[in-house]
Amino acid sequence: MNEDPPTGPLDQERRITPVSSVGEAPLPWRKGLGVVGLVTLCGLVLWASWKRAPTESEARQKPTISVANAFERPRDPPVARLEPVALPVAAPAVVERSKADELMDSARRAPVLVFNRPQQTKSGAPTIPFPGIDTEPTGSIYANGYGVTEARNELASNLKPTAIEGVRAARLPNRHLVVTQGTAIPCVLETAMSSDVAGFVSCVIERDVMSDSGQVVLMEKGTQIVGEYRSTLRRGSRRMFVLWTRAKTPTGVIVALSSPATDALGRSGFDGEIDNHFFERFSGALLLSIVNDAGQIAGARLSQANVQVNSLQNSGQGAASIATEQSINIPPTLYKNQGELVSVFVARDLDFSSVYRLRIIEGRTQILDRTIAGGVLGPQRITKP
């Protein structure tokens, strides 16, 4: 029933023409022939461009250009020899020696013993050198270790320590007869004070002042101390400086104090009631301002009536400014009442050895100078005649 497909060419199918199919070479053979031809062409080009090396005979026949004689530098002409010429020698100048030079030479040749004295301070006490502290004064120029003077820069000045003067400790000559510096002596004011005018002030010691040892009474109770003050209270200041000058004991011994006054708590100066004089300073200016305002009101009313009052207004303003300038500089006043407790700050050691002499009444026993009522003994005190 099934028919096999035809194996031969169909009637209407395109075929290869016999001309193109007969004698045609395969494709690989054609590529090989092209490569062989290309290699052959390259070989011909290389052979044509290869240069043949010249033979020995050809090299001999080729002309050579060279320099016949080597270049030589012309010789320098001989230098003429100079004969030494003797220069004239200047005669040494004769310097006349003065009398001061001769004395200086004599001083240098003289056998002098040189020694160092301790440096004296302004107070006359010798300066004690301490190890590791250079006492050389600092300055802009200094001498180094080789004796050469060099300028001192800022770094060298900062690295140099400060020279500290040494102070020797000492003992009090007699502690029984000395009131040392820093002792506070309380006292009660006898006189009132007003800083408007400079003046004097006095107070009375309310208890005995003991010596540094605490065993001898040097200023008895009731000693009067006199001082002075100046009217130097400034605006805004509320304390006045007072200087105690002298103390007089009931037995007639006087001693110069020259010590500042303090309040009961040790603050320097005296405080008190302050009067700033506000009304005195500004009352004149306020009164003149009121008068000036009244003049302006009157001037405004008079100006409606065509009356000029400019001179009256200007004079009122000038008077107000003058009054203010004169009264504004009134200083405040400090008032200190009598009977208030104040204090004396001892500024220097008070030595009573020139007026007092101690003596022992009983051997190896300290005699009591005073006793408290009731038979109770007070602190031990050495009796003075």
Image (spheres, grey):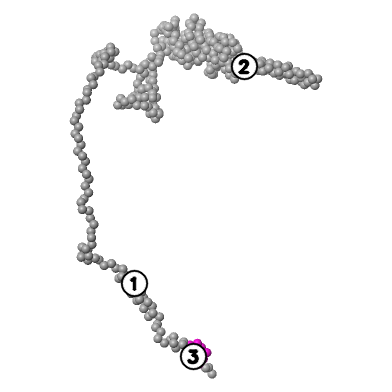
Q: Distance between the residues labelled 3 and 1?
A: 49 Å
User: Which labelled disc corresponds to residue 31?
Assistant: none
Q: How far apart are marks 3 and 2 (CA)?
A: 148 Å
Sequence order check, earlier mark of 1 and 2: 1
Q: Give the range drawn in magenta.
A: 4-15
Tell me: residue 30, above or below residue 61. Answer: below
**246 or 141: which is nearer to us?**
141
- Identity, as a three-letter code, of the amino acid under mark 3: Pro
Which numbered circle lies on residue 9?
3
**Between residues 318 and 159, which one lies in front from this camera angle?**
318
- Is 150 rendered above or below residue 106? below
Q: Which residue is drawn at 51% across and 10% down?
A: 245
Q: Mark 1 falls on what kind of element?
A: helix
Q: Nearer the viewer, mark 1 or mark 2?
A: 1
Give the residue at mark 1. 42
Do tag 1 and tag 2 residues touch (Cβ < 8 Å)? Answer: no
What residue sits 32% from the left and 72% below the top?
44
| Front residue (pair 166, 354) | 166
Q: Which of marks 3 and 1 is in front?
A: 1
For disc 2, the marked residue is 329
For label 3, the SS is loop
